[in-house]
Amino acid sequence: MTDTLSLFTCIECGKQYDIREIRYRCDCGDLLEVIHNMDTSIPKARDWKSSLDGRMNESAFCRYQDILFPSLPREKIISLKEGDTPLYNVSHAFPDFGSLKLKHEGMNPTLSFKDRGMVAGVSWANELGCKHVICASTGDTSAAMAAYAGATPNMKGIVLLPEGKISPEQLAQAITYGALTVGIETDFDGCMKLVQQLTEKHNIYLLNSMNSVRIEGQKAIGIETLHQLNWKVPDWFVIPVGNAGNISALGKGLRELHELGIIDKLPRLAGIQTIGASPLYESYKNGYADLMPQKAKPTKASAIQIGNPVSFKKAVRELKHFNGVVEAVSETEIMDWKARIDSLGISICPNSSVAVSGTMKLLDNGIIDKHDDVVVILTAHGSKFSNTAIQYHSDPENKFSNQMLTIQPSLDKLERTLEL
Ligand code: F0G
């Protein structure tokens, strides 16, 4: 082993590999995860916590790097100043909770949480000298990868997208950041299969979340939230689930904080899916039965229209560790709760709203207790999904619709419209 600080370990058989090897799976075929020798990177929890105060001018990735991915040399980090996203307290609007806070990952440079993992993944590709990076995507991973590859000298991004299934804004991101953008007449699961076949054969670095280096970067979401809460652990974290990388990262980061003694209790985790793309939910309902891949049905939450989540096993492991639950929500719930949160001045995408809707459903079902402190992870910004929002608001039948009015240019007409 050339680096003793970090290693790849198989989540199933425990076999270990050098962190500098380009590999995404164990020889046994199962998923890998990165483990670090934290005794070296973080000698004392209390010192580490207090050291953060003097590091608030660093990017979030650098600030938490000792716990995220200590093996990455500082000079190889490609940052677009991701992180330090707002944690909005919306308890005033939702008094049924002990407290309700929204961690808005849509306030990252490419408007989604993917920047958290991509700073780790692309920086590591930079350290390894990779010239080409690739991902399959439902629109947000591709935007983030394209941006970070664009920011890296001598690196070209390639993105595979399910043709016609991502929003125009997401498509524009991949193209404008300069990635070679390929639309494929299939769904996300079809793109994912192709990208795995391609990277087995060719020297192109895979940056989907089955690349476990990316998961290490995404741990920052939970860690930064706890830091913002002054390390007071909420009762729940609620998060939308598609390919299941983000819930795995959230769990891993919180687990490590606990093992290091940085937090003194574990929150519970809730993973939320759409009713038409719910393989994790189906497994959960059946006592965490083996994954039964689905043909995921179209949903307004198009970023999580995924029927065969790659990180399924990791997600189940974390859900069990955190006494977690999984819920599924309908299209009406998703769009109504999106409108409700948008109207508070917090613009969210339908995928984020899946988590909000799930939170409300779990409260109604009594699974989330009335006095619980809850943090919901909002994964991307509403600006990525303008058409979906305009469509919703132009239909007066919708619960929170706010229709635009169009009039002729006359003061009289304007006054009558405004009922003045
Ligand atoms: N929310 C948004 C906005 C996403 O883009 C994704 C995934 C998720 C939630 C789910 O996270 O896959 O880690 O469970 N988007 C991927 C993509 C699949 O290609 O952009 P997950």
Image (spheres, rainbow, N blue to C red):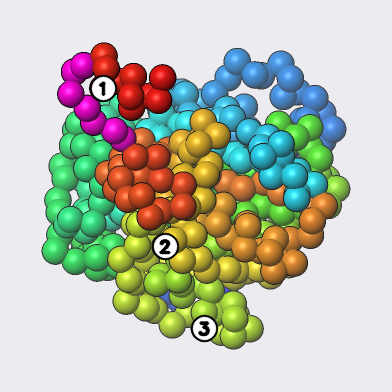
Given residues 347 and 155, the one toward you in this image is 347
> Residue at label 2?
331
Given residues 94 and 111, the one toward you in this image is 94
What separation in Å lies between label 2 and label 1 (alpha carbons)? 37 Å
Q: Tell me, yes or no, whether the two marked residues, 2 and 1, touch with CB atoms within 8 Å.
A: no
Residue at point 39%, 79% (across, down): 293
Residue at point 69%, 69% (across, down): 365
Residue at point 29%, 20% (across, down): 414
> Residue at label 1?
413
Question: As shown in the figure, which amino acid type bears the numbered disc 2?
Answer: Glu
What separation in Å lies between label 3 and label 1 (alpha carbons)? 62 Å
Find residue 330 and name its label: none
| Percent of width and height locating residue 278 | 46, 72
Residue 4, visible in the rendered structure: no
Range of residues picked out in magenta: 404-410
Q: Mark 3 or 2, which is nearer the eye?
A: 2
Q: Is residue 96 above or below residue 189?
A: above
Question: As shown in the figure, which amino acid type bears the numbered disc 1?
Answer: Lys
Q: Mark 3 or 1, which is nearer the eye?
A: 1
Whether the residue carrying mark 1 lies under 8 Å from ligand 1 is answered with no
| Percent of width and height locating residue 191 | 24, 62
Given residues 125 and 408, the one toward you in this image is 408
| Secondary structure, magenta segment, majority class | loop
Residue 183, visible in the rendered structure: yes
> Residue at label 3?
290
In reply to whether residue 239 is colored magenta, the answer given is no
What separation in Å lies between label 3 and label 2 (alpha carbons)? 26 Å
Query: 251 left or right of 149?
Result: right
In reply to whether residue 405 is colored magenta, the answer given is yes
Q: Residues within 10 Å of mark 1 (few under 14, many from 20)?
A: few
| Percent of width and height locating residue 345 | 51, 31
Q: SS for tag 3? A: loop
